[in-house]
Structure formats: structure tokens, C-alpha cells
Amino acid sequence: MKAISPDATTPTTIKPPLIPTNTVSTKDGFSVRARIDPSLANVIRQLCSNLKVSDHPALYALRDEQDELVTDENLRRKIKDKVNLKLVSSPVLEAVDIMEKLAAREDKSMKLALFSLQRYIQEEQFSSEFLKRQGLAELLRVINISHGNTLAYALKALQNLMSLDHGWSEIPRPFISRLIDILSNDQNLVNVSRPATSILKRLVEADPRFAPQATSPASSALAKTALTSVSKSNAATTSKSNLHVLTGAKAAKVGIWNYGFDLVFDEMKAQSARTQVSDSETPIKVLETVVKRLSSGDSMMAMDSMLLINSLLKNATDSRWEELANELERLNVRKAVVRLTSLTTTEDLTSSVLEFQANLVSLAYRRKTTPVDPNSPNVRKALDIIWSAARIPPPSDEAIPDGRSSRANSSVRSITLDNISIQRSSRQWVKLGFDSEDLRVEFAAVGLLGLDCLRILATVSPDYFAEVHLEQLSRPSERRCPVAKASNEIVELLSQHYHIFAPGYSTSSSFQPYFLWMHRVHNLALKFFLRIWNESGAATADFPRVAALVQSQIKYALRDETRPWHEVERDFLESEYREVRERQMRELELEDDLLNKPPVRLVIDPSSAECSELMLHQLRTLRAKLYKESFEYVRNQRIQCLVQGAWFVNGNPIPPTGSPPSRESFSLKRLPRHWRFMRLDKSMRYLHYIDSAVKIPIRSGLEDLPERIDVSHILEVVLNTCALPPNIHPGGTAPPDLPTTGSPQVASPLSFSLMSTRGGSLADLVAENSTSFSDWIDGFNMLRGDHFSTKETAEFVQSLTEIGLKIKLLDLSGEKVEIPNTLPPPPLPSSTDFFFSDYD
């Protein structure tokens, strides 16, 4: 601002007074109003000068009331929010002080140091100084020798350190073994078990297979060398040399991708072998403890256990996934998850349970596409169980057409399992209902999944299994129901019902408990198949017709996964043939009967059962292909919505019932700016955003979005977590699908929170409408995995699949239609009485 001096000859500049922006207090209790300029080093130097602090300014730093360190990156936000600040010791002094207390071995001071370390270790400046002074080695030493709350604080500090992408690249195998021992002890407190579970999960995910491709060759070689040295370390020793880690700049350059599923699973098995009697039927101790904790009264402990199980299932290697699956099945993990969903009343576990369900879909697909190898020990054992349960009588010595005895004419095969030699005739598998003796061909469509279902039926109901086979063998061959073939057909029908088409593809937006009990549903459906076969007087050529009736009944019985189990049983066991047939005819009337078109009838010969089965298989294959294409299309569209960006309302978080608000969540603070625009960058690594009091124009790109959230720090997306602020709703008028009560006690149905791997919430948001809510919720889920959680998206995928299937079938009906390449010109007009029409 300029003004004219009294002599009116020389203009002078009058500087406006400096307006203070923040209040700063010291540890001595002094407070001062100061103007904070966006240069942190200058601010601290001026504060030290004004407060007459004799120490060098480099020994001090600024923190807010939540102890968040003020850096050059967040300084502008602190100034805008006018938060109160504290002048405290710098990260260098804090690191030195904590290291001295840890080395002192005094229990009380160690606890205080570890308690502070939990907060500070997540800060880049502090963690860098801490690692330079071999802080990781000291922290691992404390974990190895401590117990109780001291151990809990140390584990939590390590968990927070592992949220960074550097600094923990050389955790030795002896420590992993110690960690598994801690986790296996079911007497440990929850505050010890929870961080131990999270650390083990992080180690599973730090797999060399998923290392960023941008890693330099030198770093990759160094990481490989580090992994080799760690793998060669003695698992029974915890000497100081084994706890040595890289420090300083070298530690920051070495990647953290040195561990992974194989290493952790080997340690789990080794720990179980040390503490238990070696037996193939004995479960792995740590997995047994983790599954038991799904029934824990602490919901957060149950969620951490669920996350670890999901991580193991998702990251299992091709050579070990079957072993992991068998271990979890032995521990009855499905029953534990179903019980967990029936006991919990919170939304926190919803995303984790849906992810577990998606992992089971992926696991089922793996088993379905794994060929049955009769030479495999596990397959031989399953075949032995099936054959023994069937109780097929030995062949008689009656003459056969060529005049020789069947016993003398049969080739005998010996299968050795556990030193037991079992003699079987060459026609044994045909007697169980297969078309041939080649089990690789018979199970080609359903793989190990089909073998599992048949084995479980033989194990659970051996008397019924034997009775059915003896009854079929007593009938004429053309009237026998092929039990094994029917079992495989039902596996195909259930796979189609639950969309088991490809690994990781799951569009279910709700929990499906009967999918977790797929084997039980299979047993009921097979009993229904056999009953309909008998009641309808079916013959061998009627197999596709009976299969179609069973498919209709499966769709009807499983129409609602929330129905009680006894109602599902009644639908399969008590439904009459006439009722099922009438319902199937009504369903056919409602559908487009495209298969009745003449060109399609040329392909399908109703009198040929083999041709009908072939066409049915082709339709299933086509549906599976279209389903995957629709899934990928919707997946890309949802992620593109995140890249495009959208406005949200900053909601008021609602803490869980009976629990106080968390201090760890910065989003719990009342924000003066109620609106937030968020956009995902093209690398899909960061969510950039800006908070504003009103909606403002946002340019394309990231220039207008100064703040960001690391996507890797998003643990899960929790729904219905916050309410709208009072009198805040988009557009000036409340849309019908966005509640505007503003009640701090009632959560908006369009609200969600991004939960952090470090604890607390990264963002608490309310979408403007249901469309934006669905796009962003499923977009976040697709970034974290491959499952949807909203009904709108699931229905969208199904609609695209059905439309695509009908279009493909219409293409079949147009085979003989000739479409001309060019149109002939029309004849010239006979008179001038015409005009040219304008086409819109």
C-alpha cells in the first residue's frame, strides 16, 4: 500500500502490520502468537530467536496438538487450518533419546521410549535417523527378550515401521520364527497378538514376485543377496550377528520384497514341527490359533486374523496353494467365518469377509481347473475313500460272451497307499457312474473340485453312498443313474450359479454362506438329482433333461442366501417332480427362446443326447467368457471414475458403540471446509484431494489438488461410518437419495471411511448420490482386490453378460443371411415433382 508524505514530494510505502496466523507454545509453558510463513526452517529459527532459546534451531521442530510433525509438505495446510503448534525437540534428538532409553535396559524408561516410538516411527525424518543408529536391530532385540505391555509396544512400533516402504529389508528368519511363536501362543494378550498378526501379514505380502518393476538392477541384486543371506541363517539361533541390519543410505536402497508366502509358510511348518508331534494329520499350530481367534470377543482381533488368512490365500504360490487350502479346510475355517458373520454386528468386518469369499472363489477355480492325476498321493487317497465307501461287490465268475470267465479276463491294477495294496477290476469306475475308466477325462471339466465333492459325500454319508450305488447296479444298464457323472454335473451347475469362472472374479455384493457350504449344497442337489431320476423314470438319454431340472431347482433353492438352512433342505428333499417341472416351463416361457430358431435347431438335434450335452457345454463356456469380459469392462470403468474425480462431503465420524473416538484419525477433527474433491492419479498410487468450504472449479490434472493419500496405506473401505454435517447437502437442494438430517448420531447410507494400515481413518466421506457411491466404493475395492460390494455393480455385470449372450446367440441365427456390401442406386425420378428430404 502506498501513501504521500506530508511534504508531498516523495512517495513512501506504508507496510501493513503482520497478522499472526498461529499460536505456538513451548515445553516451558510459554505461548506466543506468530505469523507462520511457508518456510519451515526460517519459521523455527525466528521462533527460537523471539523466544530467546539458546540452543541451535536445528534441534527443534514443530508439532500440532495431535503430535503430528509439521513438515514443508503439510505446512500450508496447518497455516490454513490455524492449528495450535508446539515447539519440540527435532526428530534427530528424539531418535537419540529413544535409542539411549532402549539401550539402558531399564524397564520403565524402555516402556516410555517404546510408547513414543509407536508414534514417531511413521515419520520419514524420525525413521531415517532411527535406522541410521541401528534402531531396527535394537527394536528386534527388545521384542526377543520382552513380554507383556513392553512386548506389545515394541510390536506396535515395528508394525508402524513396516507401513513404510524401506528400512526393514533384512529382518532375519530367526525373528520370523520368534514372531510365529508369539502368534501361536493363545495365552498372549490381544494387544500383543494384534500387531504380531499384522506384521506377519506384511511379511507375506512382501513377496519378490510383487516387487515394483522400476527397481534398479543393483538394488535387485542387493535384495537378492540379502534374501540369500537371510535364508541361510540358522533358524535356531538369535545371536547378535543375525540381528544385524543395513543402516543409513544402504538400508533405504534395499527393497523390502525379501520375504513372501513361501518363506513365512515354511517357518509356520517348522515352528509346528518343533512344538508338536510330527504327524501329517496334525494342523499347523499358528494357523490353528489364527482360525480360533476368528471367534474372539474382540472384533479388531477377529478382523486382523481375517486379514492374515486373506493375505495367505491371496499370495499363496502355485506350488503351495493346495497345501494351504488343505490345512485351512482341516481347521474348518469356513465354519469359523460363517459363525463370525452371525455374531458380529459391526460393518468393520464386511469388506474382509467379502474378500475372503472372493478368495474362496479363486481357490475353487484353481481346484476346478487342476487336472486329476491318479498318481498323486492325495488323489489316490481320495479315490480309495470313494471306492471303499461305494462297497461295490467283486465281479462274479460267470461266463462272458467269449466263453472266458470275467475274473480271468479282467486286468488287475494295484494302487499302493500307506503300504496297503488294493486290488480293483478294470471296470470299477464305470460301475460308479463314469463313462470310461480314464479319470483324467472324466474329471476334466471339474478337476479336483469335483473329486473333493464326491469324496466328501462318500465320507459324510458312507451308508447312503453305498446304498445308492448298489441300487443302481441292480437295475438294467439303460435305467441306471450315473452317480459320479451326476456329481460332476452338479459341480458344474453350482460353479455356474456362483460364477466360478476365473481366479479373483467375484461380483457378489453380499455374504453368501451357502457358497461356503458348497459341499453340503452339492450333497443335497445330488440327492435331488437321484430322486428326480427315479420319479421321472429317466433313462440314459434323459440325462440332459434331468440336469436342466436340477439347474432350475438350484436357482430356486438358493434364490436367497439369508434363508434358513432347513428351508433350503426342504426345497431339495421334498419338492415334487411335477411342481419342479411346471416351474421350469414357466421360466422357459419368460425367457427369449432363441434356441428354437431354425439355424440353431440345425446345430442341436433333440434326439441326440451327446449333441445336447456338447451344446450345453458350449453355452457354459460362452457365458464364462462373456462374464469375464463384462467384469473387466466394469472394473476399468469403476477405476476410471476414480481417475476422473468427484466431490464428496467430509462427514462427521460416528465411533463404534461403546468406544471413544480414536485420536489416531486426523479425520476425526472438525474441518471448517465441508467439501472435498478427490482424484486418483494415473499411476493409481495416490489419491489427490483438496478441501474447500464450497465447490470450486477443478481443472484436469493434479495442479489444483495439493494433498494426497497413499493408496497402499488403505487397509479397507468401511461403510456407514459417518453423518452429514448440519445443513450441508450438495447442490443447494437435497437430492432424494442423500439424507440431509445432519444428525451426528445417524450414519448416512452413502457414507464410507478409508481405514489406514497405521490405525484410524484416512478419510470419512459422504457421496453425493448413489451412483457416485457405487462407482467409488467398488473402484476402491478393485484397487485393493477383485471383488465388488454394491448391488448396483453386481447387477450391471450380470446384465452385460446376459445381453452379450443373447447377442452371440442372435449371431448364430443369422448364418444364412446375406448382407450386401453396396446398395444399388435408386432409379431416376420420372418427373421434376420431387424435393430432397432433410435428414436429421
Image (cartoon, rainbow, N blue to C red):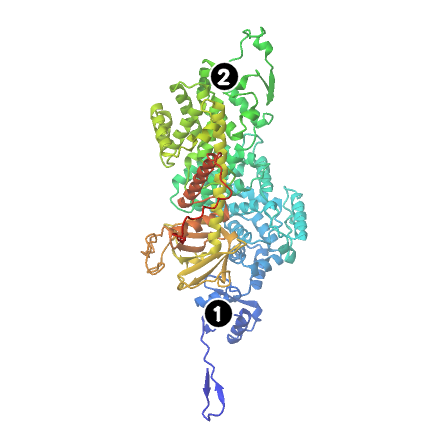
How many circles with numbers are drawn on the protein?
Answer: 2
- Mark 1 belongs to which amino acid? Asp
Relative to 141, is 544 above or below? Answer: above
The answer to whether any part of residue 580 appears in the image is yes
Q: Which picture quadrant has residue 765?
A: bottom left
Q: Residues within 10 Å of mark 1 (few under 14, many from 20)?
A: few
* Residue 305 seen: no
Position of residue 704 measured from the top left corner of the image (x, y, whole percent) = 48, 63
Between residue 380 and residue 434, name the one nearer to us.
434
- Which amino acid does the dot numbered 2 rest on? Arg
Residue at 57% over, 10% down: 406
Residue 616 percent location from the top left of the image: 47, 29
Badge 2 element: loop
Quadrant housing residue 797: top left
Give the alpha-carbon distance from disc 1 to disc 2, as whole Å. 87 Å
Relative depth, front residue between 400 and 509: 400
- Where residue 487 appears, as percent x and y from the top left, is 47, 25
Q: Are marks 1 and 2 in contact (CB under 8 Å)?
A: no
Q: Quick one: SS at disc 1? A: loop
Locate residue 380: give its quadrant.
Answer: top right
- Residue that label 2 marks: 391
Residue 751, image x and y in percent? Answer: 39, 52
Front disc: 1 or 2: 2
N-terminal of the pair, mark 1 or mark 2, is: 1
- Residue for badge 1: 28
Q: Residue at x 51, y 45 (%)?
A: 197
**Depicted 676 relative to depicted 574: above or below:** below
Question: Dot 2 surroundings within 10 Å: few (below 14), some, or many (20 or more)?
Answer: some
